Amino acid sequence: MRTQGFSLLETMVALAVFSISAMGLVSLNTQSVRISRELDTRLLARTVAENVAVDTVTEQTLSLSPVTEGEAIQRGRAYVWTRTLEATPQPGLYSVRIDVREDGGETVLARLSLLATEGAAP
């Protein structure tokens, strides 16, 4: 005797396979959204670091303070930057390191290093 359709056992197995694969896709999607947000945050932090670097290079006189801190807002997010100046053996040439963190965060999201000369701005 042959009947048409699927048995209850076949249907339950198919649903179990589908459920397992769907859970994997949901997990993958959640992970993708988290990574995308982290990359966006790091990109904005890098933009802050580059802006501080441009300000540093275009200043007529570099700040005498070896460490300068400030805040910047990018797309509604607050970032805190720290600029560290160190003299090099070459007179008038400074090593500059810029670290950027989210406001209230401990992790450095962007770090930029460059050399700057005092009074090189136009």
Image: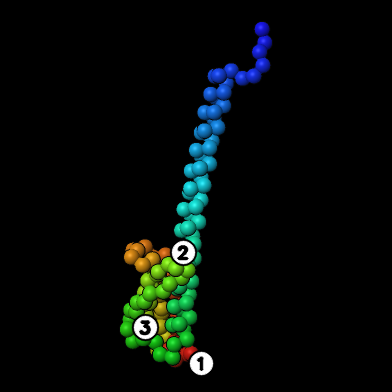
Task: Compare residues 50 and 20 and report the one nearer the observer.
Answer: 20
So how many labels did they put on this image?
Answer: 3
Disc 2 residue type (three-letter): Arg
Q: Earlier in the sequence, mark 3 or mark 1?
A: 3
- Secondary structure type for disc 3: strand
| Residue, disc 1 | 122
Q: Is residue 46 visible?
A: no
Residue 56 sits in quarter:
bottom left
Residues at badges 3 and 2 in contact (C-beta under 8 Å)? Answer: no
- Secondary structure type for disc 1: loop
In the displayed structure, does residue 15 sit left or right of residue 68?
Answer: right
Residues at badges 2 and 1 in contact (C-beta under 8 Å)? Answer: no
Q: From mark 2 to mark 1, how far is it between C-alphas?
A: 31 Å
Q: Is residue 17 visible?
A: yes
Q: From mark 3 to mark 2, how far is it between C-alphas?
A: 29 Å
The correct choice, above or below, for 58 with respect to 13 in the image is below
Name the mark nearer the viewer: 2 or 1: 2
Q: Residue at x 47, y 86 (%)?
A: 58
- Secondary structure type for disc 2: helix
| Residue, disc 2 | 42
Q: Residue at x 67, y 16 (%)?
A: 4
Q: At which x and y percent is residue 14?
A: 57, 26
- Number of residues whose C-alpha sits closer than 10 Å to that of mark 2, classed few (under 14), some (14–19) or many (20 or more): some
Q: At which x and y percent is residue 1?
A: 66, 7
| Residue, disc 3 | 87
The correct choice, above or below, for 110 with respect to 11 in the image is below
